Image (tube, helix red, strand yellow):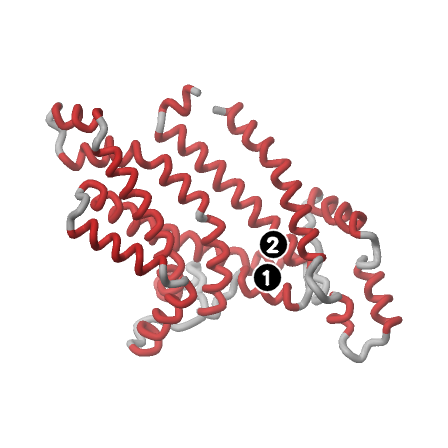
């Protein structure tokens, strides 16, 4: 298992390299010059050129890329072109709220999606199954930002049960923090719950027709033991894969949901940086997200070995 982990980490190196090249290149294709935006409309061409040289924007693109990679290797994420604030300080303020929202969304998706999918898979063509189909179709057909607006209008504006915007740190007030987090997490996690429920239903239904399920029932095991210990456990590998692959959708959705609910986080940081052509913030933030995605997929690969002994033997 240790050699397997080392091998997976070594495979992440070329992925990070390609991702860094893609991020760096795509950002340079965005129209606009950061020096023009920072200098302002009244700046002369000579002043803009001086600012470009100070920011290192006059250097050839390969030179800028190598300099940026060298800074990353030293743990330096760079400094904002516009404000001069280190990106590390900005991420210390923006990353925790986004990770908090993503984690809460995952919890909601797992708590709702897997039980609903399991019941529908055990009882196909039942009311549970039809209800799951309606839930899946209705949820997947509504974008997360639109669901967020509807939840905001109903529970915050009309009923007044929950706050409409902002964030409270769980270290300061855990209860109020959950109240501020509830609506954004539901809006973001409901779509993932529908995806998990659909895949869980399919895999559990297929597992219930296998010979080992009939053998378990012949041994006299109770229904919940057959479902949980045998059918659901053998169905979790594709579900774990879906959970890992949905991280990108969750992080992308968090950017939009944070704008809807006026929450601090990576959404506001990245959008403002793109509007201001602040390349350093955007590319450093995207690299951090790539690292998180790779680590989550590594965790999913390790979960395969815990769920299926055949994976450990291979």
Q: Is residue 252 left or right of residue 191?
A: right
- State the image coordinates of residue 27 (x, y, percent, origin top left): 68, 57
- State the image coordinates of residue 127 (x, y, percent, origin top left): 16, 52
For image coordinates 73% across by 71% down, the residue present is 37
Query: Dot 2, how many residues are within 10 Å of its Cα: few (below 14), some (14-19), or many (20+)?
Result: many
Instruction: Name the residue furthest right.
Output: 46
For image coordinates 17% across by 47% down, the residue present is 125
Looking at the image, which is closer to me, 232 or 130?
A: 130
- Is residue 114 in view from this perspective? yes
Q: Which mark is residue 270?
A: 1
Q: Is residue 45 left or right of residue 234?
A: right
Q: Is residue 175 left or right of residue 46?
A: left
Q: Is residue 91 left or right of residue 146?
A: right
State which quadrant residue 78 falls in.
Answer: bottom right
Please tell me whether mark 2 sits on a helix, a strand or a loop.
Answer: helix
For image coordinates 80% across by 59% down, the residue present is 57
Looking at the image, which is closer to me, 176 or 305?
A: 305
Q: Which mark is residue 301?
A: none
- According to the picture, the residue beneath numbered tag 2 turns out to be 285
Looking at the image, which is closer to me, 173 or 25?
A: 25
The tally of labels here is: 2
Marks 2 and 1 sit apart, C-alpha to C-alpha, by 8 Å
- In the image, residue 57 above or below residue 226: below
Q: Quadrant of the C terminus?
A: top left
- State the image coordinates of residue 275 (x, y, percent, origin top left): 64, 68
Instruction: Name the residue furthest top.
Output: 313
Query: Dot 1, how many residues are within 10 Å of its Cα: few (below 14), some (14-19), or many (20+)?
Result: many
User: CB atoms at circles 2 and 1 under 8 Å apart?
Assistant: yes
Q: First in sequence, mark 2 or 1: give its number.
A: 1
For image coordinates 48% across by 42% down, the residue present is 296
């Amino acid at each position: 298992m240790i050699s397997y982990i080392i091998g997976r980490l070594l495979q992440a190196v070329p992925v990070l390299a390609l991702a860094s090249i893609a991020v760096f290149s795509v950002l340079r294709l965005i129209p606009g010059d950061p020096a023009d935006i920072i200098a302002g409309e009244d700046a002369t061409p000579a002043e803009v050129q001086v600012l470009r040289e100070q920011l290192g924007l006059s250097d050839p693109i390969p030179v800028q890329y190598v300099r940026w990679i060298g800074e990353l290797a030293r743990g330096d994420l760079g400094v904002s072109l516009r404000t001069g604030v280190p990106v590390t300080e900005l991420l210390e303020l923006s990353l925790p709220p986004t990770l908090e929202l993503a984690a809460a969304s995952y919890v909601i998706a797992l708590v709702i999606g897997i039980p609903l999918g399991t019941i529908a898979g055990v009882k196909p063509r039942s009311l549970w199954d039809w209800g799951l189909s309606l839930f899946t179709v209705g949820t997947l057909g509504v974008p997360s930002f639109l669901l967020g607006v509807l939840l905001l209008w109903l529970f915050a504006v009309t009923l007044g049960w929950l706050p409409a915007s902002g964030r409270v740190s769980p270290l300061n007030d855990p209860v109020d923090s959950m109240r501020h987090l509830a609506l954004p997490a539901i809006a973001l996690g409901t779509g993932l719950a529908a995806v998990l429920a659909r895949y869980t239903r399919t895999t559990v239904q297929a597992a219930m027709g296998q010979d080992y399920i009939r053998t378990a029932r012949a041994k006299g095991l109770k229904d919940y033991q057959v479902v949980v210990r045998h059918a659901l456990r053998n169905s979790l590998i594709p579900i774990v894969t879906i959970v890992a692959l949905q991280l990108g959708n969750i992080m992308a959705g968090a950017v939009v949901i944070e704008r809807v609910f006026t929450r601090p986080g990576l959404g506001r940081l990245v959008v403002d940086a793109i509007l201001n052509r602040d390349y350093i913030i955007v590319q450093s933030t995207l690299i951090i997200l790539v690292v998180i995605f790779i680590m989550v997929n590594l965790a999913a690969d390790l979960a395969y070995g815990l769920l299926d002994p055949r994976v450990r033997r291979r």
